[in-house]
Amino acid sequence: MLVIIVKTSLEDHNLVVQIGDVLQSYSSIKSWSIDLDDEDNVLRILASEDISSTLSAELSEKGVPCEVMGVFMTVN
């Protein structure tokens, strides 16, 4: 499994709901969370494959600029 950390421009619950629909369209995403209290509004994704480039492009296309901060392999 991979942990994908993304800096986002998300600032409120309505935008989180909008990108939730995008995230649910990826079958490789097992779980995700957003920390709106963090200054970078970090999106943390647990996924079975690296979707960071595709997801980043899709979120930007939907009006949510973002930057992938890292992709890390988890230890089982």
Image (cartoon, rainbow, N blue to C red):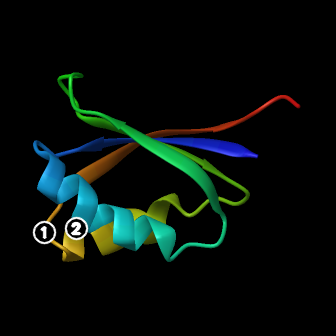
Residue bearing mark 2: 60
Residue 45 x/y as whole percent: 52, 46
Query: Is 18 displayed left or right of 33 in the figure?
Result: left
Q: CA distance from mark 2 to mark 1?
A: 5 Å
Residue 13 x/y as whole percent: 16, 48
Query: Is 4 displayed left or right of 37 in the figure?
Result: right
Residue 31 x/y as whole percent: 58, 49
Query: Is 54 displayed left or right of 46 in the figure?
Result: left
| Residue 74 in the image: above or below residue 21 | above
Corner quadrant of residue 58 = bottom left
Query: How many labels sit on residues?
Result: 2
Query: Is 34 displayed left or right of 31 in the figure?
Result: left
Name the amino acid, label 2: Ser
- Kindly give the residue lying farthest to the right in the view shown: 76
Residue 65 appearing in the image: no
Name the amino acid, label 1: Gly
**Residue at 33% over, 71% down:** 57
Residue bearing mark 1: 63
Residue 61 appearing in the image: yes
Corner quadrant of residue 3 = top right
- Residue 12's label in the rendered image is none
**Is the residue under label 1 in contact with that under label 2 (CB below 8 Å)?**
yes
**Residue at 19% over, 74% down:** 62
